[in-house]
């Protein structure tokens, strides 16, 4: 099962591959660009070829790109919405240029206009994307969110509906399941029974075949708190036992994983990777 981390693109996109390879990652995630800026420039052909070469040498799969948080595909503000759809399409172009397997996106917030409005807006954004030259090579993944405020996308059933819509438009799509966000949004994960229920819920609401990436994060926030605060694996409110149960489940255990755990010191990523690999090794022994 591929395990990796979100790595920095500081100094150049290709350096993110070196960072992932140094950590021994099988998979990796990056921002395709400065995540705090609306400005967009396509990646230069030199950067594209460097990135692709180093990725092939490092043997990394999958490469996941996360869109900027500025994008709000549910925005009730027309100008902000248009800007968001344009940047989303541009980020998809970058992802395809780089040969990324998946583009992960959050679905934004309709503010007080509610989830039905959000679905309408996102469906329009998907229709616009389907008309663009992009979206056939890199698969779009909708990420479940922690459900803070009026943000849209914490309900797996709603994400399942959007996948169907995207597929209907000829856009390959799936979900990226974030463990911290799901726990904070009120999906129980503590007991073996909880984990069994969670897998059944994913199967019913999204389809296990559409679960393409797992963001593996423990949660600083309490169960159902709607707080999007990531914690080191085993050190948060989800806890090590829950991760052990989750990672042994058929339907879950072979899905590529990306850690988005805190990076306060250079030891943090290696330690979280070690914890996950130890769980996976234990599982193999038991088989
Ligand atoms: Zn995310
Ligand atoms: Zn995430």
Image: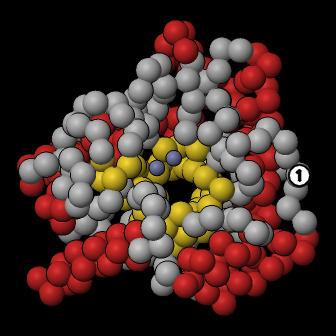
Identity of the residue furthest to the front in this view: 265
| Picture coordinates of residue 68, whole percent (x, y) | 66, 44
Q: Measuring from the top left, give residue 153's x and y in whole percent.
A: 46, 32
- The single residue placed furthest to the top in the displayed view is 112
Q: Position of residue 60 (x, y in %)?
A: 57, 79
Which corner quadrant holds the C terminus? bottom left
Above or below 60: residue 35: above
Identify the image quadrant of the N terminus.
bottom left
Task: Give the residue drawn at x 29%, y 61%.
Answer: 233
Nearer the observer, 154 or 184: 184
Residue at image position (58%, 44%) is 105
Position of 272 with respect to 94 (left or right) is left
- Say left or right for 173 vs 3: right
Residue 232 rendering spot, x and y as whole percentages? 32, 59
Query: Residue 254, located in which quarter of the rendered image?
Result: bottom left
Q: Horizontally, is 82 left or right of 176 in the view?
A: right
Neighbours of disc 1 within 10 Å: few (<14), some (14-19), many (20+): few
The relative height of residue 154 versus residue 130 in the rendered view (above or below) is above
Q: Which residue is drawn at 85% across and 61% down?
A: 43
Let me know if residue 52 appears in the view. yes
Identify which residue is drawn at 28% across, 30% down: 225
Label 1's element? loop
Q: Mark 1 points at which residue?
A: 41
């Amino acid at each position: 099962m591929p395990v990796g981390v979100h790595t920095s693109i500081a100094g150049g996109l290709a350096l993110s591959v070196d960072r992932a390879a140094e950590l021994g990652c099988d998979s990796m995630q990056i921002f395709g660009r400065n995540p705090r800026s609306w400005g967009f420039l396509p990646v230069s052909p030199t950067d594209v070829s460097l990135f692709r070469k180093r990725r092939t040498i490092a043997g990394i799969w999958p490469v996941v790109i996360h869109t900027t948080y500025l994008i709000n595909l549910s925005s009730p503000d027309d100008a902000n919405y248009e800007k968001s759809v344009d940047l989303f399409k541009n980020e998809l172009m970058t992802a395809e240029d780089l040969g990324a397997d998946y583009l992960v996106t959050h679905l934004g917030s309709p503010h007080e206009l509610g989830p039905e409005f959000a679905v309408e807006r996102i469906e329009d954004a998907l229709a616009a994307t389907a008309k663009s030259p992009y979206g056939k090579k890199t698969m779009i993944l909708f990420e479940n969110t922690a459900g803070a405020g009026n943000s849209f996308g914490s309900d797996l059933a709603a994400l399942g509906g959007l996948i169907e819509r995207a597929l209907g438009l000829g856009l390959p799509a799936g979900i990226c399941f974030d463990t911290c966000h799901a726990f904070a949004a009120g999906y129980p994960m503590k007991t073996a029974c909880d984990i069994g229920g969670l897998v059944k819920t994913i199967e019913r609401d999204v389809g296990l075949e559409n679960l393409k990436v797992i963001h593996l994060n423990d949660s600083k926030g309490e169960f159902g708190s709607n707080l999007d605060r990531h914690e080191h694996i085993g050190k948060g409110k989800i806890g090590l036992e829950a991760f052990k149960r989750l990672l042994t489940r058929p339907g879950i255990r072979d899905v590529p994983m990306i850690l988005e755990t805190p990076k306060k010191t250079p030891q943090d990523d290696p330690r979280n990777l070690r914890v996950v690999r130890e769980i996976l090794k234990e599982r193999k022994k038991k088989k």
